[in-house]
Amino acid sequence: MKIRNGFVSNSSSSSFIIVGVQMEQIDENYKTLCDQYLDTTGIDMDKFTEKICCGSIIKSKFCPSCGKSYDDVVGTINYRSLFENNNYKLKGIDIHNDDYGLIVGKHLSLDLEGDSVDVDILIKEMTNTKKKIEDLGFEGKVKLHCGISY
Ligand SMILES: [Zn+2]
């Protein structure tokens, strides 16, 4: 738990509770997230497509190494870039990004200072969320992450 006490002088801070896994930031994980939770309707996918030949991204009409035409090289989607530009559009999953990394999971709507919580509902929600996150196949243990974001 990461809570800083005192001196909360503006409204830009907010508490969060998220059941999720701290995701290793590898390309395969970004692909999984985008494939499952991002509706790409209206997104210009060309912006996130790279033509890679001979180990580099081709930016001109021909690959400078082997001379292959740009049009003949199959494009690959840069999922990390797609994610970073559109993660606010992901539906059905919550992303929390802080100094410690990227946490993928589900926010619990609890007021840390005010709420009393039905434990049965909380446990059920946590169990369901845990399963859902585990099914995504990310490495790492599903945990309850909470704290205050500034
Ligand atoms: Zn080439």
Image (spheres, rainbow, N blue to C red):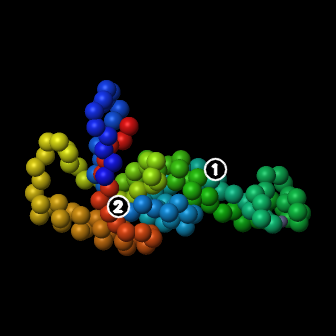
- Residue at 25% x, 53% y: name it: 108
Image point 30% across, 30% down: which residue? 8
In the figure, residue 38 lies in which quadrant? bottom left
**The label number, if any, that marks residue 139 in the structure image:** none
**In the structure shown, which secondary structural element does the residue marked by tag 1 occupy?**
helix
* Residue 144 in the image: above or below residue 135: above
Given residues 140 and 26, the one toward you in this image is 140
Asked if residue 50 lies left or right of residue 3, the reply is: right
Tell me where residue 138 sits by quadrant: bottom left
Label 2 residue SS: strand
Q: Which residue is mark 1?
A: 47
Q: Is residue 12 above or below residue 47?
A: above
Asked whether 64 or 28 is in front, the reply is 28
Q: Tag on residue 20? A: 2
- At a point 74% along the width and 62% down the height, the residue shown is 52
Mark 2 residue type: Gly
Q: Residue 61: x percent and y percent?
A: 84, 54
* Amino acid type at mark 1: Lys
- The picture places residue 134, in percent across and down from the top left corner, at 36, 71
Image quadrant where one finds the C terminus = top left
